[in-house]
Amino acid sequence: GAPELVREVVQSVIGVPIDYYIMTDIAGLKNIVELVGGVGIEVEKDMHYTDRRGGLYINLKKGYRHLNGDQALGYVRFRHDALGDITRMERQQKFLRALARQIVAPSNWSRLNQIVNEVYSKGYVQTDMNGRDMLELARLARDVPQEKVETATAPGAPQNINGASYFIINEEEL
């Protein structure tokens, strides 16, 4: 069902209408990171992993790093943590906040129109928003203090079902 089914399911789970979606893939995320000049983030631990068959090479050192596109992909895809996918989801949320900060950073204000146009026109994202709405959203985000932005992971637990990894929401706790 792609984005429309995801929207429908998430709306039913959290009880909040979702007006728009923005979706990217690995190549799109890498290109966006490169377009905005990389992303600064605190890497919480050394991350090393090689998957030659999958073309994934992660080699990140603990500490504050300014990640390029390939490094950013490694950071968000790393999954060797004690809590597995739960920690990876938290890391991905942390990264998306850092990416949003970079997109609307003062150093990118004069390029904001160009950035949004390129992200939209080159297909780095799929969305049901038009370019003008994306630009207006980016301009609004510029004025939102970071401490006012909240993310959360629904209560639940990872589970393997028929060889695939899922995150099963605990609907009672939710």
Image (cartoon, helix red, strand yellow):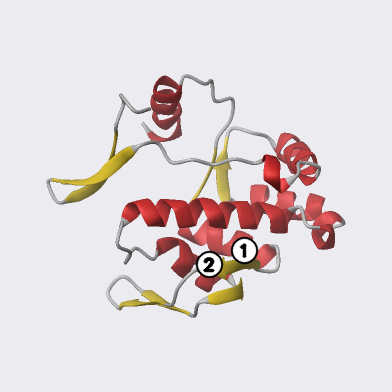
Identify the disc placed on residue 72: 2
Q: Can you say which quadrant of the picture contains the C terminus? A: top left
Question: Between marks 2 and 1, how big is the CA–CA gap?
Answer: 8 Å
Tell me if residue 49 comes above or below residue 90 in the rendering: below
The amino acid type, in three-letter code, at marker 1 is Val
Image spot of residue 121 (x, y percent): 66, 49
Q: Work out which quarter of the rendered image holds the N terminus and state it.
A: top left
Say if mark 2 contacts mark 1, CB within 8 Å: yes
In the image, residue 167 above or below residue 76: above
For the view shown, which residue lies furthest in the front direction?
A: 173
Residue 48 in which image quadrant:
bottom left
Determine the residue positioned at 73% across, 49% down.
Answer: 117
- The answer to whether residue 7 is left or right of residue 146 is left
Question: Disc 1 marks which residue?
Answer: 33
User: How many discs appear?
Assistant: 2
| Along the line of sight, the residue nearer the viewer: 45 or 37 | 45
Secondary structure under tag 2 reads helix
Q: Nearer the viewer, mark 2 or mark 1?
A: 2
Label 1 crowd bin: few (<14), some (14–19), many (20+), radius 10 Å: many
Residue type at the position of mark 2: Ala
Pinpoint residue 8: horizontal percent, then vertical percent: 42, 23
